[in-house]
Amino acid sequence: MSINTTWRQRRQAARTRRALDRALARSSSPAMRDELLTMANSSTFFTRGV
């Protein structure tokens, strides 16, 4: 695995985390917040495809 690939994956994970943070801020539904938090706390969600 090259350094570029690792950097790209880290950048994508950071972008995904920011998107989840924005979705959490907008969400008024407790069930949706729970689902988003579950996704955010899932380590496999961010390391998919490694």
Image: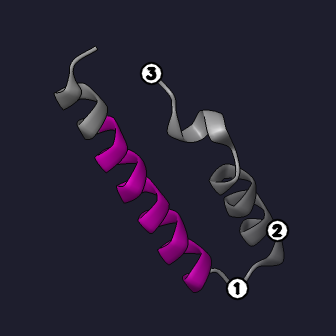
Q: Quadrant of the N terminus?
A: top left
Q: Residue 43's x, y, as percent?
A: 65, 40
Marks 3 and 1: CB-CB under 8 Å?
no
Residue underneath mark 2: 31
Near mark 2 (Cα within 10 A), the count class, few <14, some 14-19 or many ≥20, is few
Task: Give, as a single range, the part of the protein colored magenta.
Answer: 9-26
Q: Earlier in the sequence, mark 3 or mark 1?
A: 1
Near mark 3 (Cα within 10 A), the count class, few <14, some 14-19 or many ≥20, is few
Residue underneath mark 3: 49
- Disc 1/disc 2 C-alpha distance (Å): 9 Å
Q: Is residue 17 magenta?
A: yes
Q: Residue at x 51, y 28 (%)?
A: 48
Q: Is residue 25 left or right of residue 1?
A: right
Residue underneath mark 1: 28
**Mark number for residue 9?**
none
| Label 3: element kind | loop
The amino acid at mark 3 is Gly
